[in-house]
Image: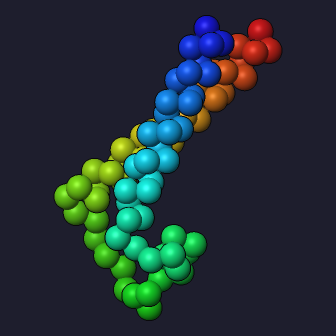
Amino acid sequence: MQAALQIASIIISVVLIIIILLQVKGSGLGDLLGGSSDSGVTRTRRGLEKTLYQITIGLAFIFLLVSVLSVYYTRA
């Protein structure tokens, strides 16, 4: 069980990194680090950008769950 959780954790983290990089692709380095070149103007996510954002949230939650289960089975 421990090996399966470790493999799942690795796969989820790689996919999460790829999806995050796809989201940031259209932004500059300042936007990546928290700054904004729009001077306070916000945009609404639409289409693929919104879908990638929702997938990112879901994968982050699944990664957190797998991590907690991994710690639980390590101690048990």
Q: Is residue 36 left or right of residue 75?
A: left
Q: Horizontal and vertical percent for residue 18?
A: 43, 48
Residue 49 image-quadrant placement = bottom left
Q: Is any atom of residue 37 visible in this view?
A: yes
Colour logic? rainbow
Residue at 51% across / 75% down in the picture? 29
Q: How many marks?
A: 0
Residue 38 image-quadrant placement = bottom left
Q: Residue furthest left?
A: 47
Q: Is any atom of residue 62 visible in this view?
A: no
Q: Quadrant of the N terminus?
A: top right
Q: Horizontal and vertical percent for residue 44?
A: 28, 70
Residue at 63% across / 29% down in the picture? 67
Q: Quadrant of the C terminus?
A: top right
Q: Horizontal and vertical percent for residue 53?
A: 36, 54
Residue at 67% across / 21% down in the picture? 70
Q: Horizontal and vertical percent for residue 60?
A: 51, 42
Residue at 51% across / 70% down in the picture? 32
Front residue of 54/26: it is: 26
Front residue of 15/64: it is: 15
Q: Residue furthest right?
A: 75
Front residue of 25/31: it is: 25
Q: Is residue 8 left or right of residue 49?
A: right
58 lies above or below 9: below
Q: Residue furthest bottom?
A: 39
